[in-house]
């Protein structure tokens, strides 16, 4: 379907995972040529950042920057339903509480019995293949996304970091992502 947004009009593609019934979206703009690199953003759902514009993270800002970039140059935005780096919304909110008590984002997840990042990019790789994407210019700061997609046979020809300024509410979070998770920030 056509989806008009603040960034322009996109084609919206809905996908359902048969094993668990979850749904994921792909927003595409422009023609996809499997022989040419396609700009792609693989974005995991973040209700607090994407919808409520929470300042605790940089997710909403990254989503907006990616949509603007794809609107200008064409490409695909995958919106994967993997809230809280895959631990789900309730656990993410509990992790926020632990962060308020002084733990960093990784320590909070571990205290809840969750890994620092539980996301799986296999479904995203399948969606990209279905759309005809083979070669990717990936909009990400996260090196695990590169590895995760290449592991499914997609060729990442370039990693395009998304640079956003920190704020007083997310400085520690971003520093943890940079130092402990290897993000390019």
Image (cartoon, grey):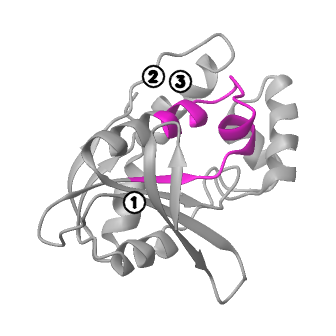
Secondary element at image label 3: helix
- Tell whether 152 sits left or right of 120: left
Residue in the image at 77% along x and 40% along y: 108
Give the alpha-carbon distance from disc 1 to disc 2, as whole Å. 23 Å
Please state the horizontal and vertical placement of residue 124, each as a whole percent of the image: 47, 69
Secondary element at image label 2: loop
Q: Are marks 3 and 1 in contact (CB under 8 Å)?
A: no
Residue 152 or 75: which is nearer the viewer?
A: 75
Please state the horizontal and vertical placement of residue 122, each as a whole percent of the image: 48, 75
Q: Please name the residue that numbered disc 3 is placed on.
A: 175
Q: Circle 3: is it few (<14), some (14-19), or many (20+) Cα within 10 Å?
A: some
- Tell whether 144 sits left or right of 47: left
Residue in the image at 23% along x and 72% along y: 134
Tag nearer the camera, 2 or 3: 2
Q: Please name the residue that numbered disc 2 is placed on.
A: 164
Q: Circle 1: is it few (<14), some (14-19), or many (20+) Cα within 10 Å?
A: many
* Residue extent of the magenta highlight: 41-64
Q: Which mark is residue 28?
A: 1
Dot 3 or dot 1, earlier in sequence: 1
Residue in the image at 39% along x and 60% along y: 28
Against 57, is 69 above or below?
Answer: below
Please state the horizontal and vertical placement of residue 149, each as a whole percent of the image: 37, 66
Quadrant of the frame with the C terminus: top left
Tag nearer the camera, 1 or 2: 1
């Amino acid at each position: 379907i056509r989806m008009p947004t603040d960034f322009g009009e996109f084609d919206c593609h809905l996908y359902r995972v048969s094993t668990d019934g979850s749904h994921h979206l792909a927003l595409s703009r422009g023609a996809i040529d499997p022989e040419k690199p396609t700009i792609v953003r693989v974005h995991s759902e973040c209700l607090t950042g994407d919808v409520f514009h929470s300042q605790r993270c940089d997710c909403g800002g990254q989503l907006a920057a990616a949509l603007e970039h794809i609107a200008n140059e064409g490409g695909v935005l995958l919106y994967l339903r993997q809230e809280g780096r895959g631990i789900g919304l309730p656990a993410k909110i509990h992790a926020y509480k632990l962060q308020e008590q002084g733990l960093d984002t990784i320590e909070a997840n571990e205290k809840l019995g969750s890994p620092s990042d539980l996301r799986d990019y296999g479904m995203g790789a399948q969606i990209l293949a279905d759309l005809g994407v083979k070669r990717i210019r990936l909009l990400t700061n996260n090196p695990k996304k590169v590895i995760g997609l290449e592991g499914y046979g997609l060729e990442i020809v370039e990693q395009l970091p998304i640079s956003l300024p920190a704020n007083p509410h997310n400085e520690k979070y971003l520093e943890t992502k940079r130092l402990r998770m290897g993000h390019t920030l």
